[in-house]
Image (cartoon, helix red, strand yellow):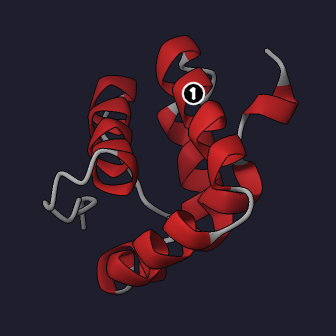
Amino acid sequence: MDVRMVPTGFIRQYLHVETAHAYMPVVLANAKRADWADDLRRMFDYVLDKRPLSHGEYCDLTFVDFESDDELYAYLRKVYDYLFLDSGAVPVPPD
């Protein structure tokens, strides 16, 4: 795994349990206008393709607990679609 390709800082800051529930539209605005948006998209592409994080590792970063890796990556796909494909559907992590 190339750890440089896992956006742990972004995940920790923007997908944290408190942020993910209440501030996803702010995350979208930041991701759209940030000078690092292209890099973030490449990192998300890598994460979705290689699946380098377990649901436990993700929980350690965000305090969001998924039942399985499959559930985690289904959620991350929704985040990706929201941030980069204008899905319009705000992804909601589990409680």
Q: How many marks?
A: 1
Q: Is residue 65 above or below residue 55?
A: below
Q: What residue type is labelled 1?
A: Val
Q: Which of 30 and 55 is in front in this view?
A: 30
Q: Residue furthest left?
A: 89
Q: Please tell me which residue is depicted at 61% across the width and 57% down the height of the picture.
A: 11
Image quarter of residue 18: bottom left
Q: Please tell me which residue is depicted at 27% across the width and 33% down the height of the picture.
A: 74
Q: Position of residue 54 (x, y in %)?
A: 55, 29
SS for callout 1: helix
Q: Is residue 50 above or below residue 76?
A: above
Q: Which of 19 and 37 is in front in this view?
A: 37
Q: Position of residue 91 (x, y in %)?
A: 23, 59
Q: Position of residue 60 (x, y in %)?
A: 64, 54
Q: Please tell me which residue is depicted at 29% across the width and 54% down the height of the picture.
A: 82
Q: For mark 1, does the 10 Å Cα neighbourhood hold few (<14), some (14 to 19), or many (20 or more) residues?
A: some
Locate the C terminus by quadrant: bottom left
Q: Please tell me which residue is depicted at 50% across the width and 14% down the height of the picture.
A: 49
Q: Position of residue 51 (x, y in %)?
A: 53, 19
Locate the N terminus by quadrant: top right
Give the residue at mark 1.
47
Q: Which of 8 and 94 is in front in this view?
A: 8
Is 3 displayed left or right of 24 in the figure? Answer: right
Is 27 displayed left or right of 2 in the figure? Answer: left
Q: Is residue 90 above or below residue 70?
A: below
Image quarter of residue 31: bottom right
Q: In this view, does 70 lie above or below 14?
A: above
Is 83 displayed left or right of 86 in the figure? Answer: right
